[in-house]
Image (spheres, grey):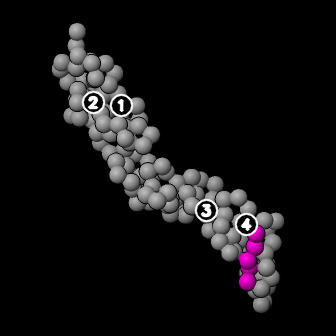
C-alpha cells in the first residue's frame, strides 16, 4: 500500500508487490513498465501483460485490455491477426496464386479451389 493515507494498492507489476510508500514507484517485474509498474511493456497486453500483441499490429503496440490495434498493411481484424483477402503467410506477405478461384485462398497456408486450367493445392501448376 502507498499514499498519504496508505489507501492505494501497489501494482501487481511491482517486483515483490512492494512500492514506494509515498508515490507508488517500484521496480517492475518482467512484462511490466512505467514508474508505478502499471503498464504493459510494448507488444504485450492483458491483466498481467501475459499476452502478445499480434504480428499485424502497427508499431508493435495494442490496446492493453483487449489486444485491439491499428493494422499494418495486408492485415485485418480487430487484433490485426488475419490476412486481407488475396494474401497469406505469417506476415501476410504472399499473394494467393492467380489460379485460385476468386483470387482468394486460405489465409494461413495459401491453399484454394482452382480455376481451369490450374492444379495443385495452391493452384500454382498447370493441368497436365
How far is the residue under mark 4 from the one under mark 2? 48 Å
How far is the residue under mark 3 from the one under mark 1? 33 Å
Q: Is residue 67 above or below residue 105?
A: below
How far is the residue under mark 3 from the one under mark 4? 10 Å
Q: Position of residue 11 (x, y in %)?
A: 71, 71
Q: Point out the tag, 2 or 1, that comes first from the N-terminus.
A: 2
Residue located 66% across and 63% down the image: 32
Badge 2: residue crowd in 10 Å (few <14, some 14–19, many ≥20)? many
Q: How many marks?
A: 4
Q: Point out the tag, 4 or 2, that comes first from the N-terminus.
A: 4
Q: Which residue is mark 4?
A: 28
Left or right relative to 127: residue 12: right
> Which residues are drawn in magenta?
23-28
Residue 42 seen by the camera:
yes
Classified by dominant secondary structure, the portion drawn in magenta counts as loop
How far is the residue under mark 2 from the one under mark 3? 38 Å
User: Is 17 one of the magenta-colored residues?
Assistant: no
Callout 1 secondary element: loop
Q: Nearer the viewer, residue 42 or 63?
A: 42
Q: Which residue is mark 3?
A: 41
Amino acid at each position: 500500500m502507498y499514499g498519504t493515507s496508505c489507501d492505494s494498492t501497489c501494482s501487481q507489476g511491482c517486483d515483490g508487490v512492494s512500492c514506494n510508500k509515498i508515490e507508488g514507484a517500484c521496480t517492475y517485474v518482467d512484462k511490466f513498465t512505467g514508474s508505478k509498474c502499471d503498464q504493459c511493456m510494448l507488444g504485450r497486453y492483458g491483466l498481467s501483460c501475459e499476452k502478445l500483441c499480434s504480428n499485424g499490429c502497427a508499431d508493435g503496440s495494442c490496446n492493453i485490455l483487449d489486444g485491439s490495434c491499428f493494422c499494418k498493411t495486408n492485415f485485418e481484424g480487430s487484433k490485426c491477426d488475419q490476412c486481407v483477402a488475396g494474401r497469406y503467410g505469417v506476415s501476410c506477405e504472399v499473394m494467393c496464386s492467380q489460379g485460385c478461384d476468386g483470387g482468394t485462398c486460405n489465409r494461413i497456408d495459401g491453399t484454394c479451389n482452382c480455376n481451369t486450367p490450374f492444379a495443385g493445392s495452391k493452384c500454382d501448376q498447370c493441368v497436365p
